[in-house]
């Protein structure tokens, strides 16, 4: 391939300014009559004649005036309107003429001479130099993306037989990136003024455009290596060069490609673009150093922001490359840990040519997606795809979260409703560059007359050029002509990440040179001069271990593993009309480890996207309120769920709970299932209406029993009392009195004494009562069945041996109670489930087996008494209580047989009340059935309670029989 000739270094290129109107074809600033005349000449000859007439009659031989050009513009506009609005050439030319008309009106109103403002500015704008040079003792090479060139399709065809052509067009200017050049000016001037850093040595630079296209990637590098003589591959013409290092970056691919070339000469390359793990490969790029810190904690930082706002349904847009895959894996891992789900993932492919056509159909998914938060991450090429897509698909109501590298590719926004308005941007924390803002406010092209970029920027922004600049004086600049008052779509005053990294990169190289020079001077340089010769490869040992604190107060080190703490700034993108865009810092995040993070954010100053508010959500399913739990939907992410009400005795006191939590046994949930309420402790107390009623009944029957006992003792010598063994009657009445009183043990606050005495006392006194009834029944049978003297049965009746039934039966019951107390005695227990909102204190019987043994034994005695009494029911009934005993045992057994199922079907204090009621009912049955008839006779029919009347009734019945 033949070298590029030196005569073609100053290229004449046609700029293509970006149009704010929807058509994407860029009109030129100079209207060529030939374009109009040659288009549809036969069909529109009349309009062609009008244009010629206007130009011939008004121009003449003198230079045209603004009014004459306005005449031509108006005529051309009317002619094009007649062509038909549906024809694409007509639409494009009409837009072109409209722009020129506006420029003509402005220039005419300011009374600017035509030949000065239009012709000279066009000559200056057409000039394009491949390099920007500033001399110094030591030189730095700078490769910055300042404009983009695109070859025509025919010229782009590769051929190794012909010299490559450079007839290209500037299709896009990156005006914001001129800040890279300005920060280089500022930093080098600051270092050169510093007497303590590189004294007596000045730094200079060569700035080249970093072509972001495959056709021109190595062009600037070859020019730099050949010292602008010719682009000679495989040659380094810098035999006596003062160049010692290169500052490049933006795209990792660009740094990698030129790094391969620079590595041949071991020239240090310091990158200012985003960190890329590929460039950290010391085997492949031993001479490359990255100023940007690692993004190891970026995924954690973004997750912290999502959790802060409660966004759990997120769409991901990542570049389709190794770095994008690594970030996607890290992000999804953290999202799973924190319960955040991915609505969909879109991998962005880089266009074949920068700003070329690419597939943007995925943008339609954004509008229909329920995800209102989108995370954007990737390399520069793939981010350009999103930049282009945002022009065709305006998305509102969506929040974008991205990295600060986005400002490298995003270009001027000329309307307020931009898709990225209100987005969040993460960037590594950077300090302010002292004095840089003041420098930007006062600098102008006249201070750097050799800088054609600065002149172009000034002409583009203010349509003028000051005296002393590259273009000379053009027009009249406004009084506020300054970089501070640039058009809103060109923000030079806000320091970008790349600019800050350029600043510290230059300082890092300066400190390395300073240390190396000190060492050379101490060791004695070979030239014995004040300025020892420095070779670029000698910098590497010093660059690997350099550490210093810059003027911004930041600790700088080129060791990638030196800083283990991540510190990110969170910025909010705010777009205003007329393309004014600002990056407002709204928060910070510090991260020492994934589990040690601190997020500081000011929600009040955040500008949200159109259609999105602070309270807006990005969720797959609406949050489950307290009192509900999430029920996952089968086959969908965990963030998609339905809400179910917490079950009984369970609560959830926070939103989006996965599970409901059970209240303790001492608490119960409120009706909303949002919190637990302490239960009220209750028991069968004397103060309760039920407890008071049962206690009164027990006391009343106890008094009645005492009264009956008194009557019997008062009338102890009467036949009705003596006839049925009055001693047994006394024992029975006393036992019934104790039965009524023992029911009081079941009422009141339970304690260990009452719990122990309840069942034992109940079992024993009822055993005495029932065994007494059994003894009385046996006595009745013996009295009527065993009448002959001398028999053993008669002896038993007379001797009172029947009374031994009572202690024998009681002793057996006592043995059962002793075993019960020895094995599993009753104890105090609580019942937290029987009554809602209450804890019932009661006595647990301990061993149910022992309890039923006691109760069963008591039932067997009652059944035996009932059986014996039933057999004696037909005996003579005068002073015979067999029928009463039978009926009393029937009542007793009926009460306790009914008690068992009812007792087991009740809970809490009602169960205790049922046991008390059974005791009272059975005791009252015995008392009423056995003693009330006798009391009736004693009180109401005393005539029947005498032996004389009994004999008279017997003799009268005998006479009647005869």
Image (cartoon, rainbow, N blue to C red):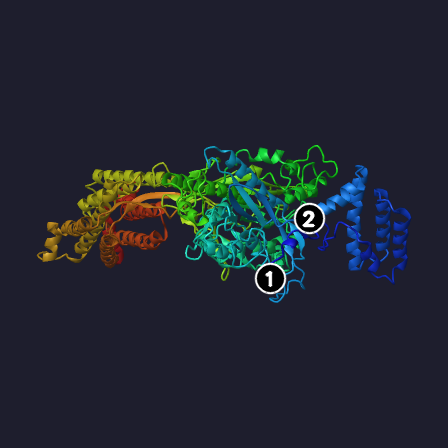
Residue corresponding to mark 1: 2
Q: Where's the N terminus, which quadrant?
A: bottom right
Indicate which disc residue 321 carries. Answer: none
**Relative to the observer, which residue lies in front, 942 or 243?**
243
Could you say whether the residue bearing mark 2 is in a helix, strand or loop?
strand
Q: Is residue 592 visible?
A: yes
Q: Where's the C terminus, which quadrant?
A: bottom left
Q: Quadrant of residue 232?
A: bottom right
Q: How many marks?
A: 2
Q: Nearer the viewer, mark 2 or mark 1?
A: 1
- Indicate the position of residue 714 as horizontal and vertical percent values: 22, 37
- Indicate the position of residue 497 as horizontal and vertical percent values: 53, 44
**Relative to the observer, which residue lies in front, 516 or 479?**
516
Give how far apart the Cα atoms at labels 2 and 1 are. 25 Å
**Residue positioned most to the left:** 790
- Indicate the position of residue 854 as horizontal and vertical percent values: 23, 52
Q: Earlier in the sequence, mark 2 or mark 1?
A: 1
Q: Residues within 10 Å of mark 2 (few under 14, many from 20)?
A: some
- Indicate the position of residue 617 as horizontal and vertical percent values: 56, 48
Residue corresponding to mark 2: 127
């Amino acid at each position: 391939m033949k070298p590029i000739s030196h005569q073609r270094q100053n290229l004449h290129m046609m700029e293509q300014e970006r149009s704010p109107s929807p058509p994407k074809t860029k009109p030129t600033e100079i209207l060529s009559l030939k374009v109009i005349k040659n288009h549809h000449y036969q069909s529109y000859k009349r309009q062609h004649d009008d244009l010629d007439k206007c130009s011939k009659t008004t121009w003449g031989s003198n230079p045209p005036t603004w009014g004459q050009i306005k005449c031509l513009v108006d005529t051309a506009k009317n002619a094009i309107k007649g062509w038909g609005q549906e024809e694409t050439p007509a639409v494009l030319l009409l837009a072109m003429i409209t722009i020129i008309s506006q420029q003509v009106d402005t220039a005419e109103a300011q009374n600017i001479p035509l030949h000065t403002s239009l012709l000279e500015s066009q000559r200056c704008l057409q000039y394009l130099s491949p390099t920007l040079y500033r001399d110094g003792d030591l030189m730095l090479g700078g490769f910055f993306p300042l404009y983009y060139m695109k070859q025509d399709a025919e010229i782009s065809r590769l051929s190794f037989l012909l010299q490559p052509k450079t007839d290209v067009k500037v299709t896009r200017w990156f005006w914001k990136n001129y800040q890279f050049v300005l920060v280089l000016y500022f930093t080098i001037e600051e270092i050169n003024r510093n007497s303590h850093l590189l004294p007596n040595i000045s730094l200079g630079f060569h700035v080249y455009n970093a072509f972001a296209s495959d056709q021109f990637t190595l062009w600037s590098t070859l020019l730099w290596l050949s010292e602008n003589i010719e682009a000679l591959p495989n040659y380094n013409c810098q035999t006596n060069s003062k160049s010692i290092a290169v500052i490049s970056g933006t795209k990792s691919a660009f740094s990698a490609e030129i790094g391969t070339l620079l590595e041949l000469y071991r020239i240090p390359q310091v990158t200012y673009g985003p960190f890329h793990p590929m460039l950290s490969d010391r085997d492949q790029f031993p001479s490359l150093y990255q100023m940007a810190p690692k993004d190891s904690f970026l995924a954690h930082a973004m997750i912290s922001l999502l959790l802060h706002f409660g966004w759990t349904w997120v769409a991901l847009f990542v570049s389709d490359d190794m770095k994008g895959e690594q970030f996607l894996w890290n992000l999804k891992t953290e999202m799973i840990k924190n319960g955040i789900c991915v609505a969909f993932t879109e991998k962005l492919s880089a266009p074949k040519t920068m700003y070329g056509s690419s597939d943007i159909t995925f943008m339609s998914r954004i509008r229909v997606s329920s995800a209102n938060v989108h995370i954007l991450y990737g390399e520069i090429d793939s981010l350009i795809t999103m930049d282009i897509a945002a022009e065709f698909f305006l998305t509102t109501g969506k929040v974008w979260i991205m990295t600060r590298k986005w400002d490298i590719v995003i270009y001027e926004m000329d309307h307020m409703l931009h898709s990225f308005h209100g987005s969040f941007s993460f960037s590594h924390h950077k300090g302010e560059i002292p004095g840089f803002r003041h420098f930007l406010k006062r600098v102008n092209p006249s201070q750097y007359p050799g800088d054609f970029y600065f002149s172009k920027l000034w002409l583009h922004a203010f349509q003028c050029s000051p005296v002393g600049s590259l273009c000379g004086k053009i027009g009249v600049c406004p009084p506020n002509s300054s970089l501070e008052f640039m058009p809103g779509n060109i923000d030079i005053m806000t320091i970008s990440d790349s600019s800050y990294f350029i600043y510290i990169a230059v300082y890092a190289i300066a400190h390395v040179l300073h240390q190396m020079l000190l060492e050379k001077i101490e060791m004695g340089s070979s030239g014995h001069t004040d300025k020892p010769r420095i070779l670029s490869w000698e910098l590497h040992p010093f660059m690997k271990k350099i550490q210093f604190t810059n003027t911004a107060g930041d600790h700088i080190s080129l060791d990638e593993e030196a800083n283990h703490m991540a510190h990110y700034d969170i910025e909010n993108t705010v777009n205003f009309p007329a393309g004014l865009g600002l990056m407002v810092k709204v928060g910070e995040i510090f991260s020492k480890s994934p589990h040690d993070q601190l997020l500081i954010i000011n929600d009040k100053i955040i500008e949200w996207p159109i259609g999105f508010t602070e309270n807006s959500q990005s969720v797959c399913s609406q949050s489950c309120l307290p009192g509900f739990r999430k029920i996952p939907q089968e086959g969908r992410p965990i963030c998609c769920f339905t809400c179910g009400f917490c079950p009984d005795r369970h609560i959830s006191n926070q939103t989006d709970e996965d599970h409901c939590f059970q209240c303790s046994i001492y608490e119960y949930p409120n009706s909303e299932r949002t919190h637990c309420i302490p239960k009220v402790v209750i028991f069968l107390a004397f103060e309760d209406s039920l407890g008071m009623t049962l206690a009164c009944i027990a006391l009343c029957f106890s008094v009645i029993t005492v009264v009956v006992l008194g009557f019997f003792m008062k009338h102890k010598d009467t036949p009705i009392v003596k006839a049925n063994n009055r001693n047994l009657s006394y024992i029975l009445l006393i036992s019934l009195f104790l039965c009524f009183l023992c029911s009081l043990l079941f009422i009141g606050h339970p304690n260990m004494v009452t719990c122990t005495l309840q069942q034992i006392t109940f079992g024993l006194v009822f055993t005495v009562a029932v065994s007494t009834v059994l003894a009385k029944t046996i006595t009745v049978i013996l009295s009527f069945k065993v009448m002959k003297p001398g028999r053993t049965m008669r002896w038993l009746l007379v001797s009172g041996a029947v009374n031994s039934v009572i202690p024998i039966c009681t002793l057996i019951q006592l043995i059962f109670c002793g075993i019960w107390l020895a094995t599993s005695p009753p104890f105090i227990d609580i019942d937290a489930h029987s009554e809602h909102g209450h804890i019932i204190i009661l006595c647990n019987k301990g061993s149910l087996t022992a309890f039923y043994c006691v109760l069963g034994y008591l039932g067997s005695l009652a059944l035996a008494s009932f059986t014996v009494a039933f057999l004696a029911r037909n005996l003579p009934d005068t002073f015979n209580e067999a029928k009463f005993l039978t009926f009393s045992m029937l009542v007793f057994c009926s009460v306790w047989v009914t008690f068992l199922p009812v007792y087991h079907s009740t809970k809490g204090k009602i169960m205790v009340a049922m046991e008390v009621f059974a005791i009272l009912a059975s005791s009252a049955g015995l008392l009423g059935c056995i003693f009330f008839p006798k009391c009736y006779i004693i009180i109401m029919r005393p005539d029947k309670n005498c032996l004389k009347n009994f004999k008279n009734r017997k003799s009268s019945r005998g006479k009647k029989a005869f």
